[in-house]
Structure formats: C-alpha cells, structure tokens
Amino acid sequence: MGDKKQDELQMIPVYIMGKKYDVPAELTIMKAMEYAGYQLIRGCGCRGGVCGACATVYRKAGDYKIYTGLACQTVAEPEMYLAQLPFYPANRATYKFDEIEAQAETIFALYPELFRCVACNACTKVCPMDVQVMDYIAELKRGDIEKAAKTSFDCIQCGLCASRCMGELPQYHIAQLARRLAGGKLAPRSEHMAEIVRQINDGAFDKWIADLKAMDQDQLKEVYSNREMEPHMGDENWRPKENRGLVS
Amino acid sequence: MKLAYYPGCTLKTKARNLEDSALAALKALSIEVKELDRWNCCGAVFSLADDDLIHHIAPVRNLIRAQEEGCEGILTLCSQCYNTLARAHNLMIDDEEKRDTINRFMDEEPDYKGEVQVIHYLTYLRDHVGWDALREKVKTPLRDLRVAPFYGCSLLRPDDVAIEKDPTILEEFLSALGAQTVSLTEARECCGSYQSLANPDAEQQRLGKIFGAVNRSGANAIALSCPMCEYNLGRQQHQLLEQNANLTATPTYYFTQLLAVALGIEAGVCHFDLNGKPAFELLKEKSYIVSAAS
Ligand code: FES
C-alpha cells in the first residue's frame, strides 16, 4: 500500500461478523479485518502461512458452500462473509507416552468417540490444508496407525475439522496421537542420532561451545555473518566445509 | 470383471485370521485381488429407519471408491460388511429419491447409480473357481472333520441380498474341501448379535439352542464367515460351557481358515491363536497342519 492515500485505493465491500466494511482490495482476510479495526490476539500467529493459528471460515454471496483458508494467506474478495475463530474447543486425552503401546486399542481406549464417525466427510471438506481427514479417521478405526500418521502429516492443528464433525470427534488430537505413536514407537530408530547423542554426552563438542561462549559480541557477529550456508539450489551431494558438528 | 477387495475394519484388527487365510487361499488359487486404495468403515449395520440417510453415506462412499478405481465389483469377506454394502447398493438402485438425496449430499464425489456389484467371497469361489476345480486343488482333504456350517443372518437376510435362497453354499464348499457336513436349521438363525452385550441372558439361551443342535448332530467343528458370529459362538463359548455341563466344546473356524488348511497353506497364516487352542489342537490331531518350520 505504501503511502497511497485511501481514496486512491480500490475498495471492496466485505462483511465482518455481519457488519459491512469497505476495505482495500488485495488485502488478506487478516489484514482486511485489522484494517476494519479488529485487533487479533488469538486466531493469529506467524502471519506467514506456517503456524495454523489463523485458519478461517468464510462464505461468498449466493453460494451455499463453506470456504476455509488461512486468514494470513487468503486474499479478501468482494462480498465475502468473514469472522475470525480464535479457537475451537476439542478434548485432548491425557496419557503417559512411555506407558502406552502403538496399537489400535490404545487409540480406541483414549478416543472411543472415533466410532461415532459416519463418513460424512465434512471434516475433509473444511480442512484448509486439504488433509484427507475422514480417510485418516477411517484408517485409525481399522488400527492403521502408520498410514494415518502419513495421511494427517500436513495437519496444522487448527481444529476446523472438529468444528464440523457430526460425530463430535476431536480429529486433529487423535491424529496427533497417531503421529506420536508412529514416530515414537513404530518408525525405525535412527542410529546416527543415538551416536551423536553419545558423542555429545562424551563431551565431543564442549570445547567448541566454550569457545563460542568466550567470544565478545563483535566476534560473535562476525562468526555469525560468515557462517557457511547451504546454497539455495544446493543438490543432495552438497556437504559443508565446517563439519565439526557432524557424526565422526 | 475388475474387482476391488474391501476388507472391512474388523479384518484388520480382531479378525486377522479371517483376512489373512482368505488372501493366502486366493493366492494359492492364482487369483489376484487388490485392496481398495481408500476405504472407510461400512458402518457394520444397515440403518433401517426410513429417514436416516446419513448412515448410508459410509457404505455408498465405498462403492464410489470402487467405481473410481474402475471396478465393476467389490469383493467382501465379512458377512456384516457384505450385508451393509449390498443393501446400500440395492437402496441406490431401487429408491430414486433417496439416491438423489445421498448423491447430492456427497457433492464432492461422483454420483453413484448402482454401478458396482457387491460380491461375497463364497459366491465368488463358487462362480469363478467352481467346486470341482476347488476340489482338485485340495491338498489336504478334511475327511475326518464333521463340520456344521453356521450362516447366521447377514449372509441370508433380507432376501434381496441373500447369497443363496435355501442356502447350501457352505455345505458345498466344505464338501469340496473333503469335509463331512451337517445342515442345521439353527445354523440359519441369528447368533444373538449385539445381544451378547445388551442382553446376555437371552444370548445364552440362544447359544444354548445352537450348541444343543450342533452337539446332537455329532459335528466336531463349526464354520462361519462373520466376526460377530465368531465372537458369540467362538470367543464367548467358554461362558456357555461353564453354565451348561451337558454341552460339549466345539471349535469354530472361519471358512477361509479351513480353505487355507485344505489347500496346504502354512498354518501361521491362519492365526489359529485367535480362535483359541482347541481349534488348532483338533486340526493338528487330524494331521492337517502344515507348519513353516517342518
Ligand atoms: S498466522 Fe500463522 S498461518 Fe496464518
């Protein structure tokens, strides 16, 4: 927008919680709301399309469909009906991760409401990340934890699925449990990780850290500015010259 | 006909013995089937309320998945999945108004107009392999087994989804495996279904009647195709026996386990541990078991 005056901007009408506002075209939904005077404390986070805090629901004039998107990424259109959801309540089961097993029965016991799913697919339709939500619920009903972890991988935990569920499931919490079980108990252990932890514990990097700690601010700045970075188009064979931090 | 295989949820958890034996048997018969890429629970029970369409969404969606994969048929094993899918399929053919409502509700999917035939494994064996051809493939005829086939409800009722009217299909199948069969009226009745949880006394009476008939017939094994029947007749049998000293224990098997054993398939695939010890012991005693180790 820069320093353009308001009357030079092309304005579009939007409805925020039912009230009409004229906002500059090409703003994101989030910025349109802020332009209209709303201060977003919840339902807003990174502003970069990463954190998932700003998942939003909107409608368009003359269309029965519910639309969703990230408010910080989706550009407002004329006649949009907008509101920002700060949070949608959904129960998360508590468990001690060390004490549960990566089995279908674990999920059934913690989330028995899983079986209230009727495959209506409203969850999938509302997902701003295009996750096949109903599919991962179906996979969990048959105990396929690994597949559900993959299917739900792009979930940003916005909770819109739970808001639409006629079975009242907290899908995204169930999926998170599945991913934890898959990652923590089913996926093969990474051997090099164990090795580097051993080296850390043996003090292999202590001197390096101590050197850093001893530097003054200017030295630190210099080291930081001159750090070696992976080239943007680096291929998989790229290796850093600085390799003190790699497993030896 | 291109077929999609629909396992159903129970076969992936509590009834692995049904699925794994069935798939191994198909392989031994040189039949290839491919599981649907995407599928959801069928709902397990076909909703009877006239205005309750939402519970038909799940089975119809599976039929759509099969259609999307270019399949003309969907092959099922579990009696309850078979029943639910077949009835939903019929509903979509017979009731134009409901079909439209259901199709319009699923506005993210292609319409379904009844393009996919629902086929039970048993019917498939009969029609695509044939009993004579099956008999020839049998390596271990189950001669000393006297088997009572138990049909239960889901394969037989209502009429329009019955895999056979006045069924003899299980008897013919078991005969092809070399077993003797006994046909019982009680084997065409309900196993008690979910009453085992809601009304255990009525369930026990029902089971008492079934096992009375099984015992009188001299059967030493029961063959079935439904995880619900297997739960009531198999897993819960010990309760019945504790309360009725006059009844004799009779191991239960999924029909596909007997098929796999007769085809000489290594017994590990059948997961007999899920049936309980006596089931395995009986087959071992008759020297029918082929184990990977030996
Ligand atoms: S604010 Fe983080 S994704 Fe929009």
Image: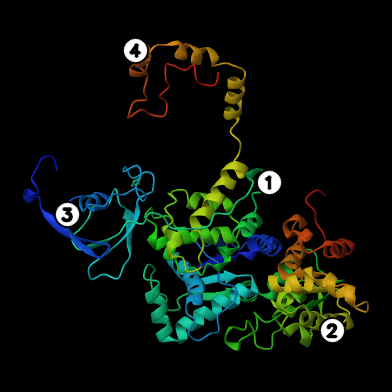
- Callout 4 touching callout 2 (CB < 8 Å): no
- Callout 4 touching callout 3 (CB < 8 Å): no
Q: Of the numbered discs in the image, which one, if any, rests on residue A23?
A: 3
Q: Is residue B149 visible?
A: yes
Q: Of the numbered discs in the image, which one, if any, rests on residue B213?
A: 2
Q: Position of residue B89 (x, y in %)?
A: 50, 79
Where does label 1 land, which residue? A99
- Chain ID at mark 4: A
Q: Say which element carries label 2.
A: helix
Q: Which of the colour schemes (rainbow, by chain, secondary structure, one colour) is used?
A: rainbow
Q: Position of residue B265 (x, y in %)?
A: 74, 58
Rendered view: A213 above or below B187: above
Q: Which residue is depicted at the point 76% across and 67% down?
A: B258
- Chain ID at mark 2: B
Q: Are marks 1 and 3 on the same chain?
A: yes
Residue A203 versus residue B54: which sits nearer the camera?
A203
- Callout 1 touching callout 3 (CB < 8 Å): no
Q: Say which element carries label 4.
A: helix
- The image shows a total of numbered marks equal to 4
Mark 2 surroundings within 10 Å by alpha-carbon count, few (fewer than 14), some (14 through 19), many (20 or more)? some
Mark 3 surroundings within 10 Å by alpha-carbon count, few (fewer than 14), some (14 through 19), many (20 or more)? many
Q: Are marks 4 and 2 on the same chain?
A: no
- Chain ID at mark 1: A
The disc labelled 2 sits on which kind of residue? Ala
